[in-house]
RNA sequence: GCCGAGGUGGCGGAAUAGGUAGACGCGCCAGGUUCAGGACCUGGUGGCCGCAAGGUCGUGUGGGUUCAAGUCCCUCCCUCGGUACCA
């Protein structure tokens, strides 16, 4: 158990993503946790006060599905799994700080979700609105945009295709932080995650341009039609406009003789909006409204169309179409015979060259053409001047648009944190009333019943649903939506610091000294969910004065994913889940740990195959042998002419290994670390049974070997360390209380080297010599070699390249 | 399409301030040990030619830079992850 108040040592907060209590640990949990445990152990050996907590992300749908199937309450199912997994976790030999555990489905945790929700609500960062939201028909739950995956737009949990529904829902205003979330200054995160978050936020710089509808027989004109464009420099190339079919202006400006067609198209769009509309390779469709718009830069009248390739949810839901310089507009114009006007010309082309396809490249030497006073400018200058002129005439503004949407947190499920508001039914009604802090937590009922037809049991569980208005005391009912479980995981690392605190969500003092988290480890699958939400929460809670920092995790490492033997993601339904239990009982926890580390780079993962585990198992047995039985009984001991030299070479090898292993810890390069320890063990094995085996050098090498193994193979190293102490007659002390040893710099420098010699870049000889000789001496030694001479025979030496300590290359002709 | 990661023996993978390609392990082959099997130990193991010494080719493709390229530059191909008509 970590003493969080200890200020005498450097603090190190090591966090690994807490698991969902699905029932059993699988090999993937080991792949995340055991190397992370090695990090913890290594830091402890280096004198750090390490805080390495664990907990359970305990709300969520699997518990409900189990409950519906078996009739067990989700809480009972979940807590039983938690118990089981706690037990299984212990078999890893991971040094988790169990005293700091949090289980998010317990009232003493979710109470603070509610408290934080109320703070966000007060700050205007939580709000309720009617919106077209993604609905999973199978799970009967609304999904955040981030939880809808792939081109088919399926539910991230169950893979069912989602549909759109208009519902009143609670949101967190993550978009307020869009710009700051793009800034990764001061945190050391992997490039792929930063790229994914950056793409997800999707910042586009451009301008909103105000078009006006043109007057005609059926329409007096003058309606404002705002469009967003990233290319205001192409404004003169706009030959038509396109509105999303859902655009509010459609009804008002459609010509009477076009109404039938337009209504039919809008209806068609609604009907198929779920599937076909998403397909990018579908042929473009659309209909004209029979009304024109006026281009603010040149007064030109251009027709207004509606088409489903324009999305209502992005920008203003309307675009100016510039077919010469936008592929989609080009495709549309070609299909419907609309004019295409070139307004950007790449260098070396004439202004009116026949356009084939859309020219969209953005190069410094392209220029604006066919654009009145702006013709001849560079595209960049045209951009700036056109926007400036629009702004001066109130016809547009420079604008930034984002792809990211506010975080939809409402879930229509009973197994989550109740959103702490009530709906007053008094007359007059107080409306939506937040539950006062002193009435928290709003407890989940422990007696809710599912119905076969589905639906949220909280809506018919009167003990929960019926309440009184905290403001007027009149009749009221509770909000029955619960929070997305990603709310729980957006602040849990702070709660670990004081999981039992009853007066605060986050202990400010401990938060100030222990966070941000020094090192976070976990999978990359949460790149635009958990990892983005957590950054948002940190910034929001910082603005609310609840925490001191603006970034939650200083360093992030994403380990790869262990796939099933079939190369697919492990899942119960595929039947490819690997249970480590059998391997652990057969080979021991340390062999499983080392095998997972030895497989390859930690950030790579890969398909599971246990076929190589014999290798690390044999390795550990050889370690056992060299430590406990250095002399052996079998065979004739090999004789050494020079025991002293052999002993020294062993010492040199041990200290070089120590240097390299220390280095590998910094980059979590477990695979090469294990390989180097195997090499050292193989060398010890070679000297086993010889006079070297009893020497002080042997003793030092085996001592270092065990210390180097301690973080990664904690059980075997402890066992052998104990026996070693016993043999030496020294009082027992755990290897895990030992300090990480320093390597001896004098021992790692080579006292002789084999210098590679190339002739014309091809390796021809290895020349033994002392290191650091002067070049002319090296050349003399090299040229004296028969092999070198043979390769120079009859040729002229043009030059000799010396790379000190690396090689010599003789260039001949 | 765009963004990101990657392509090295039969397999997992080593090696990037350019400098001995294939560390380490699996598998396989041979030998030792064993009644036998297993386990363990020793040696071998990129392709081709060769008894060997040695030679030669070789890091997805094709070019380039360099005394020297898996590593740097350009072209193309493929695999995986993310995204998806975002204006």
Image: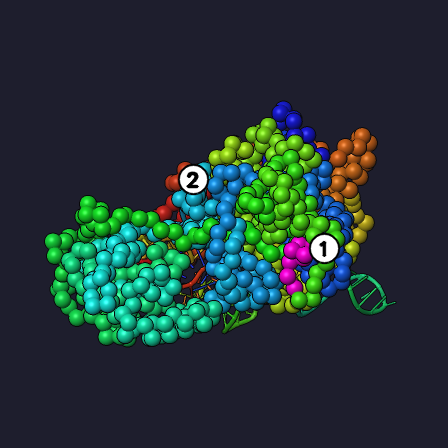
Residue assigned mark 1: A448
Q: Chain of mark 1?
A: A
Which of the marked residues, 1 or 2, is nearer the chain's N terminus?
2
Q: Position of residue A308 (x, y in %)?
A: 37, 68
Say whether residue A789 is left or right of residue A324.
right
Would you call the spot at circle 2 few (<14 residues within 10 Å), some (14-19), or many (20 or more)?
A: few
- Residue A266 seen in render: yes
Residue name at image x 64 percent, y 61 percent: A455
Secondary structure category for the residue under label 1: loop
- Residue A48 seen in render: no
Q: Position of residue A660 (x, y in %)?
A: 57, 42
Is residue A547 positioned above or below A761 on the image? Answer: above
Q: In which quadrant is the C terminus of chain A drawn?
A: bottom left
Residue name at image x 17 percent, y 70 percent: A354
The residue closer to the viewer here, A217 or A314, is A217
Secondary structure category for the residue under label 2: loop
Q: Residue furthest front?
A: A427
Residue name at image x 23 percent, y 72 percent: A338
Q: Chain of mark 2?
A: A
- The residues bearing labels 1 and 2 have C-alpha atoms spaced at a distance of 47 Å
Main secondary-structure element of the magenta-colored stretch: loop
The residue closer to the viewer here, A371 or B4, is A371
The residue closer to the viewer here, A622 or A541, is A541
Would you call the spot at circle 1 few (<14 residues within 10 Å), some (14-19), or many (20 or more)?
A: some
Say whether residue A213 is left or right of residue B47.
left
Is residue A667 positioned above or below A600 on the image? Answer: above
Is residue A506 positioned above or below A390 on the image? Answer: above
Residue name at image x 53 percent, y 65 percent: A162
Q: Is residue A518 magenta?
A: no
Q: Are marks 1 and 2 on the same chain?
A: yes
Residue extent of the magenta highlight: A454-461
Residue assigned mark 2: A185
């Amino acid at each position: 158990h970590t003493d969080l108040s200890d200020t005498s040592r450097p603090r190190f907060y090591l966090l690994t993503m807490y698991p969902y209590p699905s029932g059993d640990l699988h090999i993937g949990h080991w792949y995340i946790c055991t190397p992370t445990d090695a990090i913890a152990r290594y830091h402890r050996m280096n004198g750090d006060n390490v805080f390495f907590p664990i907990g359970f992300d305990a709300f969520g749908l699997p518990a409900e599905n189990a409950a519906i199937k078996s009739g067990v309450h989700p809480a009972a199912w979940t807590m039983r799994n938690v118990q089981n997994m706690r037990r299984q976790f212990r078999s890893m030999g991971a040094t988790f700080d169990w005293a700091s555990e949090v289980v998010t489905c317990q009232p003493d945790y979710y109470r603070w979700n509610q408290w934080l929700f109320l703070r966000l609500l007060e700050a205007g960062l939580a709000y309720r609105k009617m919106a077209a939201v993604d609905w999973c028909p199978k799970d009967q739950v609304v999904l955040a945009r981030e939880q809808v995956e792939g081109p088919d737009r399926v539910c991230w949990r169950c893979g069912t295709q989602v549909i759109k529904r208009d519902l009143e829902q609670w949101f967190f205003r993550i978009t307020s932080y869009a710009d700051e979330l793009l800034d990764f200054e001061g945190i050391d995160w992997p490039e792929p995650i930063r790229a994914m978050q950056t793409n997800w936020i999707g910042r586009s710089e451009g301008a909103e341009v105000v078009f006006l509808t043109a007057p005609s027989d059926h329409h007096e004109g003058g309606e404002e039609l705002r469009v967003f464009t990233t290319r205001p420099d192409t404004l003169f190339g706009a030959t038509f406009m396109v509105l999303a079919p859902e655009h509010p202006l459609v009804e008002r400006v459609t010509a009477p003789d076009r109404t039938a067609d337009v209504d039919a198209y809008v209806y068609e769009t609604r009907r198929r909006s779920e599937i076909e509309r998403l397909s990018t390779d579908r042929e473009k469709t659309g209909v004209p409204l029979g009304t024109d718009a006026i281009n603010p830069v040149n007064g030109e009248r251009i027709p207004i169309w509606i088409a489903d390739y324009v999305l209502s949810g992005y920008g203003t839901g309307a675009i100016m179409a510039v077919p010469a310089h936008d592929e989609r507009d080009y495709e549309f114009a070609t299909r419907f015979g609309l004019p295409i006007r070139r307004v950007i010309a790449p260098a070396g082309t004439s202004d009116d060259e026949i356009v084939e396809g859309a020219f969209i490249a953005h190069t410094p030497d392209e220029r604006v053409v066919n654009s009145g006073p702006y013709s001849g400018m560079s595209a960049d200058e045209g951009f700036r001047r056109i926007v400036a002129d629009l702004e001066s005439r109130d016809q547009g503004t420079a604008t930034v648009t984002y792809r990211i949407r506010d975080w939809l947190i409402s879930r229509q499920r009973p197994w989550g944190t109740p959103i702490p508001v009530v709906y007053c039914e008094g007359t007059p009604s107080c409306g939506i009333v937040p539950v006062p802090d002193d009435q928290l937590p709003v407890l989940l009922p422990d007696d809710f019943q599912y119905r076969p037809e589905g639906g949220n049991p909280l809506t018919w569980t009167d003990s929960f649903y019926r309440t009184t208005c905290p403001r007027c005391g009149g009749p009221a009912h509770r909000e029955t939506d619960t929070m997305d479980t990603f709310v729980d995981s957006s602040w849990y690392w702070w709660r670990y610091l004081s999981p039992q605190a009853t007066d605060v969500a986050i202990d400010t003092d401990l938060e100030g000294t222990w966070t941000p988290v020094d090192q976070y480890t976990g999978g990359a699958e949460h790149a635009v969910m958990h990892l983005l939400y957590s950054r948002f929460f940190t910034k929001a809670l910082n603005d609310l004065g609840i925490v001191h920092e603006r970034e939650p995790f200083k360093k992030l490492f994403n380990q790869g994913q262990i796939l099933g033997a079939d190369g697919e993601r492990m899942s119960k339904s595929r039947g490819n889940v690997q249970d480590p239990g059998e391997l652990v009982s057969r080979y021991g926890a340390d062999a499983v740990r080392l095998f997972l580390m030895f497989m390859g780079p930690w950030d790579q993962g890969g398909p599971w195959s246990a076929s190589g585990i014999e290798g690390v198992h044999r390795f550990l047995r050889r370690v056992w042998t060299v430590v406990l039985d250095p002399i052996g009984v079998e065979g004739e001991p090999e004789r050494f002419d020079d025991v002293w030299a052999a002993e020294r070479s062993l010492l040199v090898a041990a200290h070089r290994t120590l240097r390299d292993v220390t280095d590998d810890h910094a980059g979590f390069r477990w695979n090469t670390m294990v390989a180097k320890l195997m090499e050292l063990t193989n060398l010890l094995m070679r000297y086993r049974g010889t006079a070297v085996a009893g020497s002080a050098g042997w003793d030092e090498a085996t001592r270092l070997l065990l210390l180097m193994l301690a973080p990664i193979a904690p059980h075997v190293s402890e066992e052998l360390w104990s026996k070693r102490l016993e043999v030496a007659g020294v009082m027992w002390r755990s290897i895990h209380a030992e300090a990480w040893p320093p390597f001896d710099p004098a021992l790692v420098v080579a006292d002789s080297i084999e210098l590679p010699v190339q002739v014309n870049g091809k390796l021809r000889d290895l020349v033994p010599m002392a290191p650091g000789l002067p070049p002319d001496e090296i050349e003399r030694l090299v040229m004296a070699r028969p092999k070198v001479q043979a390769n120079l025979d009859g040729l002229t030496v043009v030059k000799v390249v010396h790379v000190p300590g690396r090689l010599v290359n003789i260039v001949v002709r």
